Image (cartoon, grey):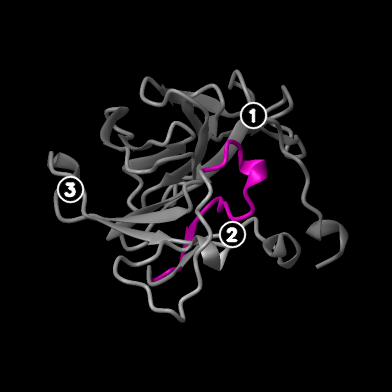
């Protein structure tokens, strides 16, 4: 193909939120549905439609323009900015994570929350689903990743989801010490610092999550680099 045909062109702009938009996610089975989350504490689901940008419908050369339509708005749960949004593999559920420390699973048919997970101690920066539908995961500024198992009929159960927590640390001296007597050879650990007040003061926060196609791996991009990790 020619170089000109490989250039992507902007099709349009989606507007409708009252504040910054942080994340978006296409419904995996129907590309015409898009979810966006914002600092206005809402999630909007859009139907992406292409229409002719010409009044003459008989003109084969008429340009096509993007005409998104807001299908619904999900709100009333998160009290602060929603940072991340992700569709479930089946397309029925929508997962959101916010800086109020809560992650919410929404039923996109009833447009109501079915699970509100409040297990993190700080901002939730990223969420994702296992492509096979066996678990969902959340990453937080509290330096932890939580993986929630999804048993059969999990959405109808009032029981809490079984959780596995993975923690990461940039400073080896900040790793929690096991209880018990210390030997003479063990160096004294530095006292752990309190959770940071803002993400700019912490080098190891992770944002956005991505699961491998078979669900065996979760990738979490981090803010730590070789330069700031030494500090």
Residue 130 higher or lower than 46, as above or below: below
Query: In what quadrant of the picture does the N terminus appear?
Result: bottom right
* Residue positioned 60% across, 58% down in the render: 222
Question: Which residue, as the protein is rendered here, is positioned at the far right?
Answer: 3
Q: Please give the range of residues in magenta.
A: 195-214
Q: Which numbered mark, 1 or 2, is in the foreground of this view?
A: 2
Q: Secondary structure at mark 3?
A: helix
Question: x, y percentage for residue 3?
Answer: 87, 63
Q: Which numbered mark, 3 or 1, is in the foreground of this view?
A: 3
The label on residue 221 is: 2
How crowded pointer 1 is (Cα within 10 Å; few <14, some 14-19, many 20+) is rated as: some
Question: x, y percentage for residue 164?
Answer: 29, 59
Q: What separation in Å lies between label 3 and label 1 (alpha carbons)?
A: 34 Å
Give the labeled residue for mark 3.
Answer: 154
Q: Can I make out residue 33 in this image?
A: no
Q: Secondary structure at mark 1?
A: loop
Give the labeled residue for mark 1.
Answer: 14
Question: What is the chief secondary structure element of the magenta stretch?
Answer: loop
* Residue positioned 51% across, 60% down in the render: 174
Q: Earlier in the sequence, mark 2 or mark 3?
A: 3
How crowded pointer 2 is (Cα within 10 Å; few <14, some 14-19, many 20+) is rated as: few
């Amino acid at each position: 193909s020619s170089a000109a045909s490989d250039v992507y062109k902007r099709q349009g702009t989606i507007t409708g939120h009252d504040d910054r938009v942080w994340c978006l996610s296409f419904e995996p089975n129907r590309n015409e549905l898009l979810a966006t989350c914002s600092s206005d504490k809402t999630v909007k689901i859009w139907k992406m439609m292409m229409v002719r940008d010409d009044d003459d419908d008989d003109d084969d050369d008429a340009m096509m323009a993007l005409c998104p339509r807001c299908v619904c708005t999900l709100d009333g749960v998160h009290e602060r900015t929603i940072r991340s949004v992700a569709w479930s593999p089946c397309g029925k559920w929508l997962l959101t994570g916010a800086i109020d420390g809560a992650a919410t699973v929404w039923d996109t048919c009833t447009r109501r929350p079915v699970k509100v997970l409040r297990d993190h101690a700080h901002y939730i920066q990223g969420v994702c689903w296992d492509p096979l539908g066996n678990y969902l995961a959340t990453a937080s500024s509290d330096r932890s990743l939580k993986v929630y198992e999804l048993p059969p009929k999990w959405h109808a159960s009032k029981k809490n989801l079984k959780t596995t927590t993975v923690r990461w640390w940039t400073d080896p001296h900040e790793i929690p010490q096991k209880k018990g007597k210390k030997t003479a050879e063990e160096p004294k650990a530095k006292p752990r610092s309190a959770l940071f007040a803002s993400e700019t003061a912490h080098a190891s926060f992770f944002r956005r999550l991505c699961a491998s196609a078979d669900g065996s791996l979760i990738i979490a991009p981090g803010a730590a680099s070789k330069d700031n990790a030494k500090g």
